[in-house]
Amino acid sequence: MKLHWSPRSPFVRKVMIVLHEKGLVDRVELVRSVVVLAAPANPDVLVDNPLGKIPALVPDEGPALFDSRVICEYLDGIAPEPAMIPADFDGRIRCLRWQALADGLTDILVLWRNEVAGGDYANPKICGSYETKALATVARLDAEVPDLAATPFGLGHAAAVCALGQLDFRYGGSGWREAHPALARWYDEMGSRPSVAATAIEDDGAAIMGDVEMPLRFGRAS
Ligand SMILES: N[C@@H](CCC(=O)N[C@@H](CS)C(=O)NCC(=O)O)C(=O)O
């Protein structure tokens, strides 16, 4: 299998966490694929994912797969143990709901940074909306820490780890840990899991956007 990969993509990281959990890392060729929303699409990625996004997985047989949710579902199917998506209905819905919540936050964190990088072109109404939703989503994750902690590690947990990792990576100084200490403690506990530790986000210097100062601040009236 081939994976369009980047060490700094939170969505790629989610797939990597699943690969580590399942012991499948050696089965995958990682291809460093640089993608930037506000730049021309990477032609090598477009061949496999016409949306131009990573991750995209090219299995040994069959068409290329995207997005991260479909890839993770596929990996859970070809290597069922340990299950990343519970088989029972209630557990499955709980897991996929957490994934939707966390992936939605990650989407906002990625798109907001692109918006701010546009400088004078950044739409303040869109940025304001991103801020409201990011604050609300982190608060919701914090409120659900008892439930997260009581549930075996799965795809929803992986997605939440990736979203919070993105906060640390691109939104340094946001103060989310001080505002949500229970969530910060849970996140730190997750960090000792081998699949999480092995996939920590890294900037490999292939950045095109450069430094973008993000205005997200927890714990202040907005
Ligand atoms: N919903 C997609 C989101 C993937 C995504 O936004 N990936 C970013 C990198 S973190 C990307 O490819 N951005 C380039 C672009 O949007 O053109 C998934 O879950 O895989």
Image (spheres, helix red, strand yellow):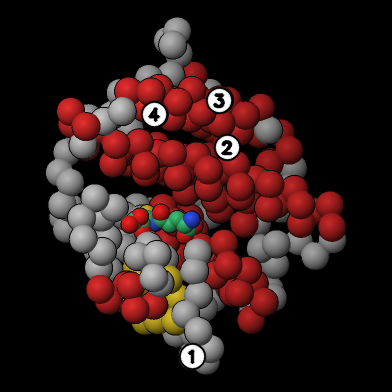
In this rendering, the label closer to the viewer, 3 or 2 = 3
Res. 136 mark: 3
Q: CA distance from mark 4 to mark 2?
A: 30 Å
Disc 1: which residue: 60
Q: Is residue 102 above or below residue 174?
A: below
Decide: few, some or many residues near mark 1? Use Cα within 10 Å; few <14, some 14-19, many ≥20. Answer: few
Question: Where is residue 131, by image quadrant?
Answer: top left
Compared across the picture, whether 212 is left or right of 89 comes to left
Residue pictured at 57% horizontal, 37% vertical: 186
Q: Amino acid at mark 3?
A: Ala
Q: CA distance from mark 1 to mark 2?
A: 37 Å
* Residue 33 drawn at (x, y percent): 27, 68
Residues at badges 1 and 2 in contact (C-beta under 8 Å)?
Answer: no
Residue pictured at 48% horizontal, 30% vertical: 134
Residues at badges 3 and 1 in contact (C-beta under 8 Å)?
Answer: no
Disc 4: which residue: 126
Disc 4, SS: helix
Decide: few, some or many residues near mark 2? Use Cα within 10 Å; few <14, some 14-19, many ≥20. Answer: some
Residues at badges 4 and 2 in contact (C-beta under 8 Å)?
Answer: no
